[in-house]
Image (cartoon, helix red, strand yellow):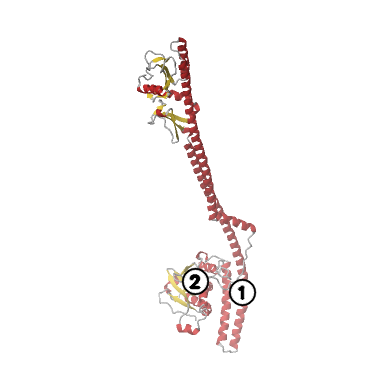
Amino acid sequence: MHGREISNITHFDLGHPAPSSGHTMRFARQSLFNNRWTWIGMMLFLTVGLFVASTLGWLWYAEKRATSARQASLDLLWMEQIITNKLEAHQIMLQNWAVDLHPDSKKSREEFLHRIDGLMKENHAILAVEFLDQLQQHLIGLPEYEQRPGNLPPLNDPLVSETINQSRSLKSVAYSRVIEQFAPLWVLALPSDNEFIKDSSLLITYDLDKLLTQEVPWWFVQRYDLSLVDKNDKQLSPSDGGIVNHTQELNRLDFGPATSGLSLKTSVRIGQNFDTLLISLALAVLLFGLLIVWLLRLLRRWLIERQTAQQALRERDELLQHTARLSSLAEFASGMAHELNQPLAAIANYAAAAECLIQNDQIQSPKVKLAIEKMGEESRRAGKIMRSMRNLIQKNTTPHEPYSLLRLINESIELIEVQAQRQHISIQLESHVTDLMLACDAVMLKQVLFNLMRNALDAMTHDSIATKSISAEAIETENQLPHRLQIIARTMEDYVCISIVDDGHGIGEMDKLFQAFYTTKSEGMGLGLAICRTVIENHGGKIWAENNPDLGASFHFRIPLPIPSAQNITSGPPMNEKTAL
């Protein structure tokens, strides 16, 4: 991992206030709502609630439906018993009246007719009541006729004769099968114990359509659809109004004797069908589910908007803090440059005085003389750096002067050469341009090169530690070093591009690389690469970085070529490499 710093900027710490308890609680709440498990839990809770509500609704619906089915069965049974009891009452009354009948007594005959007339007026379903002799001849009854009415079945009808014979043979009540004429007719034959007429019978003819209409109460008709069918499921009643369409919830009950084959069918009317209730329940559950989804989307959108607003607020606070730190740094750098100018000037004066004394005393010591000259040059260079840094921070324009590109690169290599020797790292310069004069601030460009090369060496430091156990003889014998730092100079259209390539660990967070105060060094400030970018951009250039395909990273920067010197650019073979051992 690369850490990119300028080494001659003094480290200082801008502390951060400790987080308060309120901030911690707000952060905990934000983490709670931003956690996907919170959303999953809420959705699971709502889903379980919806499932429980649906289950309870279904159980309620099933209970109501079962209750309705039981009630329909009970109502049908009650109605069948009402009709059966009514028919049995008619049987008892008519049998008693037949016993009291004296055919030769006018008074008895009139009383019998009066009684059956009242019965027929109260029960419109009874079409005829007839007293028959042994030969099945009409003796007395209503309606009175000389020729049998057409709405009554003939006495010699096979179904009627069969019913009369069955009643006489069994000495009990007998019902005929349904006789379909203008209406479904039902004939009831009763054996009579009249002492005056032996083997006599009572014959009662019912209109089944009227019987159901008369005996079925109004509330039953409003609640249920009712029909009377035969054994072939043919509808006999009601005969008017078409076929009754029953729902799936159908109740069926046998009516009359088993030989009649009649059945009563009932079903809940459409208006009270519980399928409508089920549909309503399903729609309610669906609407409730859609409401839950809408509320979750609304809550999520509100939380996203809230998070966006909080993020914008945090970014604004960070920007304010960043601006305040930059302002403090500018004041600090300006004061530091002002304060260091005096001791640097004193060092330069002392170096000049020592050089004069050596010349006057004729001291022949080339190393001492070279050391003093270097001391003076470095003190003057430090002063130029301070002035350039001050101009950079205060945004004053620094005059650009012509300077040789190769001299700029070589002088930067000399500054880092000693550190490279200690780390056993070779430095190779590969130039594809001839000597080129640039209009630039040479002091700051040297610092940019120095910073990039120093960062490259730091990136390879961890691997270089492993080579400390290698002896110098082994290194000289093999004539190679474990790491290599390359400096490549080439032209790109109207720019000259310089690349610093290493084989370290590469760059981790590329997007934060040139941000101020971002660093991966434990003792760094995070200003080196930010200042490098500012210097390059002040020269009208651009700086960027990338990871190598195999190992390490590369930093590139380009600055515009001076137009008058464009003819000095020629292509040529790479220069000899310069190796620091």
Specify whether 156 is left or right of 109.
Answer: left
Q: Is residue 426 above or below residue 161?
A: below
Element class at badge 2 = loop
Quick one: 300 or 52, which is closer to the camera?
52
Quick one: 164 or 110, which is closer to the camera?
164
Identified at 53% across, 44% down, the residue is 53
Mark 2 packing: few (<14 Cα in 10 Å), some, or many (20+)? some
Q: Which residue is mark 1?
A: 341
Question: Where is residue 114 drawn, in percent x and y?
Answer: 47, 14
User: Which residue in the rendered view is the most extreme toward the top?
Assistant: 106
Q: Which residue is mark 2?
A: 505
Q: Is residue 129 above or below residue 461?
A: above
Question: Where is residue 187 drawn, in percent x and y?
Answer: 40, 22
Amino acid carrying label 2: it is His
Amino acid carrying label 1: it is Asn
Question: Where is residue 545 drawn, in percent x and y?
Answer: 48, 68
Return the mark for residue 450.
none
Quick one: 318 or 434, which is closer to the camera?
318
Quick one: 27 or 223, which is closer to the camera?
223
